[in-house]
Amino acid sequence: MDAASSIRRYAYVARNARGGRVTGEISADSRPTAYQNLSERRGLTVFSLHETKSLVSSFEVLTARALYWFYGTTIAKAKLIFFRQMAKFMRHGMPIERALNTCMSTSQNPRFREVLRVVTADIIEGRHPRFSEALALHEEFSTLEIAMIRAGEGGAGFPMVLERIERLLSRNRRIVGKVTRALFYPAFVTLGIVGFLVYIVTYFVPQFAKIASEFDQATPPYLVILTNIGEWLASPFTVTVLVILAAIVFIGTRTLLLIPSVAYAWDAFFLRVIIAGEIRRKAIRSTFSRLYSSLMAAGVPIEQAFDLVIETITSPVYRRALREIREAIRLQGGSFSEYAAKTGWFDPDYVALISAGEQSASMTDSFDTVADEDDADVDDMLDSLSALLEPILIGVLGIAVAVIVGTVYGSIYSLIGKIK
């Protein structure tokens, strides 16, 4: 492969020496090279740096995830264990080189073990003596983690920073697992319902139509409809068309959501959906509160912490709201709670708790408190949603089966009466 074919495009978010926000793209042969060009040659403080996605890079990501699954552990789990180990080692005063060597030797993830090998070599050989600099060259570590480590390393609070990162990763892993478990049962039952109904309509029902024709009897109208539906579903042409339509809808939806106005409108609509929207709102607020609190506790400057958290939030609605809050504070002064209440996306209870923290100079504790409460609410609502979906899905399955079976058996009795 020649040098030109190995060049990749990286999108970045950074701050210049005057404090202005800078975004753009840069070409480089690797992420470390792009990071070095931005930080050393252009003098930017990089907040976010990731490769712009293409069909090839997306395939590489899918392949990497498949390999992670094959090895029995993911990068997220390996990183959680790494920060947990490092926090304990730093708490007991172990030299960082020895701590990294120990983490590398005990890591069960081959790719992450290679990352740690490079990080350890960079520190020992002096290429990047600072821990944060060595980690920043690897995309496995987020800009939030790098910023927290950069703010805390070299001080007495460094172990606390590592513990904060470990708790953040543990919390994210727990939430993802909770959501996955909550959605797995409905998805599994829905798939079973669809498969069962397709089997009945495509194989079971047509047998009775054949019986009617063998006795020279007219097939009952409802049975004809079900038979036609079954034949239509069983046709290779139909299957091909449905797959193509599903692909078009999927790709079209993804393309539309790349348009900022469409993404914002969809997010605003979803955030107002009963139960699901409330779960998403609380999860987003919890993520923001937890990250912002952790960055402030690590010693990251407030304005930089705000920028980092905004780039992490996936909701277009909350990103816009947080940017409005940041700009209002920067231009007019005032407090976070004052402007958060005006956006309409922060509950009165949330604003009240943050306001209390601002007045008592305990902002970090207040954000931690509201994050804990929102996490607890999300857990309860996910449990309630799972409990609500179960009887609904069972009822839908029962009604569908009753309608089809009733139609079939009604047709059988009608056919038997005619034969007699």
Image: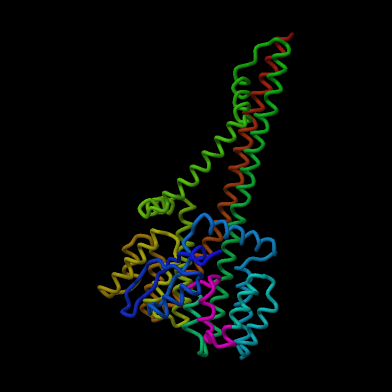
Expressed as whole percent of the image width and height from the top left, the position of residue 92 reads 63, 89
383, above or below 192, in the image: below
Q: Residue at x 65, y 63 (%)?
A: 68
Does residue 272 appear in the picture of this structure? Answer: no
In terms of depth relative to the viewer, which is nearer, 19 or 377?
19
In terms of depth relative to the viewer, which is nearer, 59 or 419?
59
Q: Is residue 138 magenta?
A: yes
Q: Residue at x 61, y 31 (%)?
A: 233
Q: Residue at x 63, y 79 (%)?
A: 117
36, above or below 414, in the image: below
Q: Is residue 95 left or right of residue 155?
A: right
Expressed as whole percent of the image width and height from the top left, the position of residue 250 reads 50, 46
In terms of depth relative to the viewer, which is nearer, 68 or 299?
68
Way the structure is coloured: rainbow
Kindly indicate the quadrant of the structure image that contains residue 240: top right
The magenta-colored residue range is: 122-143
In terms of depth relative to the viewer, which is nearer, 397 or 166?
166
Q: Is residue 348 magenta?
A: no
52, above or below 252, in the image: below
Expressed as whole percent of the image width and height from the top left, the position of residue 332 reads 25, 73
Q: The C terminus is located in which quarter?
A: top right
Kindly indicate the quadrant of the structure image that contains residue 124: bottom right
Q: Is residue 369 left or right of residue 110?
A: left
Kindly indicate the quadrant of the structure image that contains residue 166: bottom right
Does residue 54 appear in the picture of this structure? Answer: yes
Q: Is residue 348 left or right of residue 133?
A: left
Q: Is residue 81 left or right of residue 340?
A: right
Expressed as whole percent of the image width and height from the top left, the position of residue 359 reads 36, 78
Question: Which residue is at the far left?
Answer: 332
Question: Which residue is at the far front?
Answer: 2
